[in-house]
């Protein structure tokens, strides 16, 4: 045990599982999204550990691109970026407990939609910039359009600098839907209200990834900025755009190979019974690590260009796969989630098999898995 500890301290530790993040693809995606409509700037969304990619790693990569600001959900995430020495401005979009602001002057911008948070900012962070969050019909957070004028006046009375006006689409991939059109109309109305009050925000934003990918269909009504999460990481929420490139690969190594005879069973509850003699590989990775349990007996991993079926129940830290027809050995590297969106073990296709959305698979990648930039 002591020798193992010494080995780790000396840097000899070799992780069982690894997530590779492509800096080239992050840069490509940012530049592509920025090119869709030159009047719309891109603000990367790094909430939820940068959608499982690692907030500090992605923060350092997008910081090089000099975005207008980086979006996070919480004060904690803003602090994480600050500790990573990120220089780009940061917008906190989610709720912040008022007493958490009673610390020191903070260089962040804040989404505001209640008098409670406005009062707290005015008292504890009077230098803060705010983005007024208007509810255009999604009915989550936000100030109702009918209350916007009074709210803006209140923010002005507290002498906070109004840097932005923002909202959020419920289904940006359907620009012609009556409810989406209603959201656009209310967002336009909100801008008129601001103008009447002689408040001209620097940033006006409602679009998410689907919004910017469909920018042409919105005919210039999205404002001048889009907050992009999933598309920045190379996944089109609609599964159609091939111009964005997935940025993440999850890999592991084979820990054991064994022969299973026809009629023998594998894993918890014996849900898989071999119909023939077969070779299986034991992988030291499971649902704790982000290999969703719903992929049991129907998902895939890959070795080079070859697809390998998952057999038996996925365990907390173990997955078994059929390697009968491939030449692999203990130590061979296996790809759990591929960065090829057409592969059967891509994030998109794996999520579809689980009846999930890609966001869910990504954010469930445990933070304890080592991330490396390639």
Image: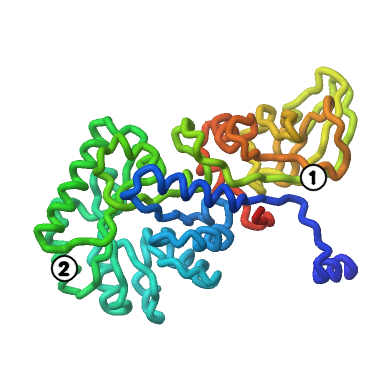
SS type, badge 1 = strand
Q: Residues within 10 Å of mark 1 (few under 14, many from 20)?
A: many
The label shown at residue 154 is 2
Q: Mark 2: which secondary structure?
A: helix
Q: How is the image coloured?
A: rainbow
Residue at the limit of the structure toward the bottom, as seen here: 104
> What residue is rendered at 37% in x and 79% in y?
102
Residue at numbered disc 1: 253
Give the x, y percent position of residue 56. Answer: 56, 63
Q: Give whichever of 226, 170 is nearer the camera.
A: 226
Pick the quarter of the image with the N terminus: bottom right
**Is 163 on the left-hand or right-hand side of 65?**
left
The image quadrant of residue 127 is bottom left
The residue positioned 25% from the left and 38% from the top of the image is: 219
In this picture, is 88 found above or below 371?
below
Q: Residue at x 38, y 46 (%)?
A: 208
For the point 19% across and 74% down, the residue is 158
Q: Quadrant of residue 116?
A: bottom left
Distance of label 1 from label 2 (alpha carbons) = 58 Å
User: Pointers 1 and 2 in contact (CB under 8 A)?
Assistant: no
State the count of labels.
2
Q: Residue lying at the far top in this picture: please name it.
A: 275
Foreground residue among 371 and 94: 371
Q: Earlier in the sequence, mark 1 or mark 2?
A: 2
Q: Measuring from the top left, give residue 124's x and y in whole percent.
A: 32, 79
Q: Please tell me how crowded label 2 is: few (under 14), some (14-19), or many (20+) other residues with Cα within 10 Å.
A: some
């Amino acid at each position: 045990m002591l020798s193992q500890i010494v080995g780790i301290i000396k840097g000899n530790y070799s992780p069982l599982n690894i997530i590779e993040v492509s800096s080239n693809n992050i840069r490509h995606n940012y530049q592509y999204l920025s090119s869709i409509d030159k009047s719309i700037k891109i603000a990367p969304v790094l909430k939820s550990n940068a959608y499982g990619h690692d907030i500090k790693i992605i923060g350092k990569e997008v910081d090089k691109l000099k975005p207008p600001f980086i979006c996070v959900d919480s004060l904690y995430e803003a602090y994480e970026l600050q500790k990573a020495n990120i220089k780009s401005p940061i917008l906190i979009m989610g709720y912040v407990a008022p007493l958490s602001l009673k610390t020191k002057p903070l260089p962040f911008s804040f989404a505001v939609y209640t008098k409670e948070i406005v009062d707290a900012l005015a008292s504890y962070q009077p230098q803060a910039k705010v983005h007024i969050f208007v509810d255009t019909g999604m009915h989550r957070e936000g100030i109702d359009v009918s209350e916007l004028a009074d709210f803006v006046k209140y923010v002005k009375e507290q002498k906070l600098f109004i840097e932005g006006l923002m909202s959020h689409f419920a289904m940006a991939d359907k620009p012609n839907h009556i409810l989406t059109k209603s959201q656009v109309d209310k967002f336009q109305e909100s801008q008129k209200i601001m103008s009447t009050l002689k408040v001209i925000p620097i940033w006006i934003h409602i679009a998410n990834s689907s919004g910017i990918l469909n920018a042409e269909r919105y005919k210039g009504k999205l404002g001048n900025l889009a907050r992009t999460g999933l598309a920045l990481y190379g996944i089109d929420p609609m599964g159609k755009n091939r111009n964005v490139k997935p940025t993440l690969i999850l890999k592991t190594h084979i820990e054991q190979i064994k022969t299973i005879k026809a009629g023998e069973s594998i894993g918890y509850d014996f849900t898989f019974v071999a119909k023939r003699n077969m070779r299986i590989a034991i992988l030291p990775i499971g649902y704790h690590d982000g290999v969703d349990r719903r992929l049991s007996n129907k998902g895939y991993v890959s070795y080079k260009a070859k697809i390998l079926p998952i057999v038996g129940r996925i365990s907390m830290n173990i997955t078994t796969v059929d390697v009968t027809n491939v030449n692999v050995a203990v130590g061979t590297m296996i790809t759990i989630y591929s960065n090829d969106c057409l592969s059967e073990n891509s994030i998109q296709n794996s999520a579809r098999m689980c009846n999930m959305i890609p966001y869910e698979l990504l954010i469930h990648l445990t933070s304890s898995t080592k991330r490396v930039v390639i």
